[in-house]
Amino acid sequence: MKKETNTSPAKKRGMSFALSTIIVGIGLIVTKGSGLIRDVLVSMKFSEEIYRDAYMLAFNVPDLFYNLLVGGAIYSTIAPYMSAQLAVGKEKEGVKTVSKFITLVTIVMVVVCTFGTIFSVPLYNLYAVFQTVKHPETVYLAATASKVLFPQVFFIMLAALCNGILISYRRFTITSFAPVLYNIFVIISILLMGGNTLLNLTLTMCGLFVAALFNFLFQYLLGFKQLKQFRLNFHFADKEFLQLFFRAIPILISASVIQINNIVLNGFALQFDSGSVYLFRNASTIWQIPYSIFVVAITTVMTPELSGDYKNKNYSKASELVSRSMKSALFMTIPSAVFIAILTVDVVKAIYQWHANYTNDNAATAAVFLLGFCSSIITATVVHVFNQAFYAIGKTKLPLFAGLIGLVINPLICHTLITLGVGLLSLPLAYSVTNICQMVMLTIMYCRHKEIAPHGILGFLLKAGACAAIMGLVVFILDMFLPAQGGKFLQLVIISVKGIVAVVVYFAMAVIFRMPEATEWIDRIKTKLLKKIAAKRV
């Protein structure tokens, strides 16, 4: 008798976990690289710090509405739900339910974008709750510029809907490289229209609107084969749809909590000197580079896989998947945190100091923020993996609970530290402590589900920590004898040398400790090299 299988057609046509992760990772690297170019150009074209801050601040409220109403639910609800339906052969039912979800969020976003465009100034005046805002004109400029960003959010939403659906069909190449197109249009907009006037700021935002439109069209046209099935459907009185809707609500709130914390921290940043909002964003971007490249790449592939395994009750496979994802992510983020902590100023200068507008004082301020964020590279890894694992198995209320706790802890700690005179470091430290609390809560709650809990994590952490400590000592000594100096090219060469030494030392120690996360990468490289040699001989 022929053995039946629960593997969905989409999964059969899909790529392997490793290959999918690599593709997503490459896409994220290119996206992050183009995003860094975009942020560097902000300091070049907006030479006055008040306009840099206004540019960054303009995104806060539109992003909050996006996350509150759509953002987190699209990827964390649609992708797991549709993946589970594909895994059990219920594609048509899944398409019908998701179409209703798309219809609802489209209606809501049209209303919200209209509201935000009309009332942007009163919304931004809420920053007055931070009584010691030093530069209220920055808030006014941001509010005016955001009038264009609210319509942009509508097309960001459409692109995210395409992204969530295509991920469930494992079309990772399209979803990984679409943001690059967006960043390219943003870069062009800043280059052509950036400047120190309200008109220049507004025109730049118009360019971002065009970028969002093309980002949506790129994904829709290339993924047309899958996306054409989804049409507007106003029949909301459906049990399956209501279940999906109520599952999405905790995710929506969880996603908005992150943005609310960001708004709160930016509000505190407005209490310091002009330019602090922009430099705080610089530090946030840097620490999120390893987090985004490694962690998001891994969980993007993990989530639909885990959803299918859990739906089919393959609990041992689900546990192994979460374990492998957690270890793979931490294997790369732990040494990244140590390397950045040792070379904070050098890292900031290497990435952002390409023009005289970005002074050494700017770099020093951003480095203070970055130092406080370093532990978040590790803790946010654990938080994100567990959050996505909870979403994949349909238990969305638990991440919400952890997020709400963080919403209380973050401003409380930040205010306390500022009152105690900790200064700029108060902002990232508050965020880091909040992440630690969330990590502890999520770990305890997820590991209560013993059948799908990750295993072997403690032993892995001891080995990875030892490898990172030895690597950090070597980099610290090397930095004493080879400090970053000279022109820009020489600075980049020196920090690159330190980076290469760090990678070699870390992987060498990981091999000595027989960590499979290191040997797997080495084996893959050996296999590819051997194939190339064999092909040349033929």
Image (cartoon, rainbow, N blue to C red):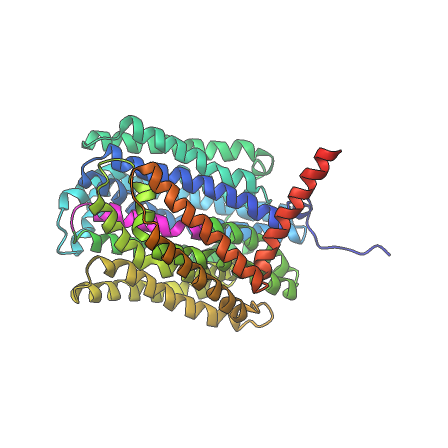
Query: Chief secondary structure of the magenta span?
Result: helix
In this rendering, is residue 272 above or below 450?
Answer: above
Tell whether position 93 is magenta: no
* The C terminus sits in image quarter: top right
- Residue 214 sits in which quadrant? top left
At a point 60% along the width and 52% down the height, the residue shown is 522
* Left or right: where 535 falls relative to 266: right
* Left or right: where 415 falls relative to 155: left
Q: Nearer the viewer, residue 449 or 25?
A: 25
Q: Which of 168 and 291 is in front in this view?
A: 291
From where the camera sits, is residue 75 visible? Answer: yes
Q: Position of residue 134 (x, y in %)?
A: 12, 50
Provide the residue span drawn in magenta: 273-292
Tell whether position 277 is magenta: yes
At a point 60% along the width and 60% down the height, the residue shown is 516
* The N terminus sits in image quarter: bottom right
Q: Position of residue 49 (x, y in %)?
A: 19, 41
